[in-house]
Amino acid sequence: MKDFSNLPYRPCAGIMLADTLGRVFVGQRLDAKASAYPDAWQMPQGGIDKGEDGEAAAIRELEEETGITANHVQIIARSANEHLYDLPDELLGKIWKGKYRGQRQFWFLMRFTGEDRHVNIATDHAEFSDWKWADPKELPDMIVPFKRDLYRAILKEFEPLI
């Protein structure tokens, strides 16, 4: 078995997008039904490109995954610390071309100032097959097991601001 412990973490930006009612956007990944986690949902997130800062990556990823443009969000907060997660053994070496052991993420809390009609998950970089607004307290139970601690930490930090 290959040793993946020396692989780096992929730099990433995550977005907790809250509506005016205090609900949070979650999407069901396009590949969820064919995976080991068919009922898993997640908040938008994605890699930070070389030379790109976290906030710019978060805005770009939000638009690429949800169709929501910068003029329909307001950035409320950035996570105080970077959050790490490791991929489970069955995914190591299989995703991100085997270059990473997991992700290191800065998270951004954003307020959605638009309307549901401004959400369009059928983008050129589609990641989601479905989306909904969820109660923030339900987030850890909706996510894949290997990201639950990370979601709990993000929720704890951002909950007073949602």
Image (spheres, rainbow, N blue to C red):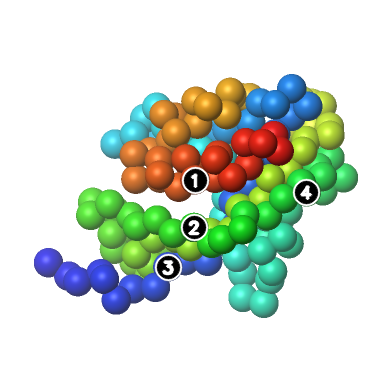
**N-terminal-most mark, 2 or 1:** 2
**N-terminal-most mark, 3 or 2:** 3
Q: Give the residue at x 60% y 65%.
A: 48
Q: Which residue is mark 1?
A: 153
Compared to residue 138, the image places residue 54 above or below, namely: below
Amino acid at pointer 1: Ala
Q: Give the residue at x 53% y 27%.
A: 137
Considering the image in quadrants, where does the C terminus appear? Answer: top right
**N-terminal-most mark, 1 or 4:** 4
Q: Give the residue at x 28% y 59%.
A: 92
Q: Distance from label 1 to label 4 (Cα)?
A: 19 Å
Q: Which secondary structure, mark 4?
A: strand
Q: Which residue is mark 4?
A: 75
Asked whether disc 2 touches disc 1, contact meaning CB atoms under 8 Å apart, the reply is yes
Query: What is the crowding at mark 2: few (fewer than 14 residues within 10 Å), some, or many (at least 20)?
Result: some
Seen from the viewer's position, the closer of residues 52 and 24 is 24
Q: Distance from label 4 to label 3 (Cα)?
A: 25 Å
Q: Is residue 19 left or right of residue 16?
A: right
Q: Distance from label 2 to label 1 (Cα)?
A: 8 Å
Q: Which residue is mark 3?
A: 9
The dot on residue 118 is none
**N-terminal-most mark, 4 or 3:** 3
Q: Distance from label 4 to label 2 (Cα)?
A: 19 Å
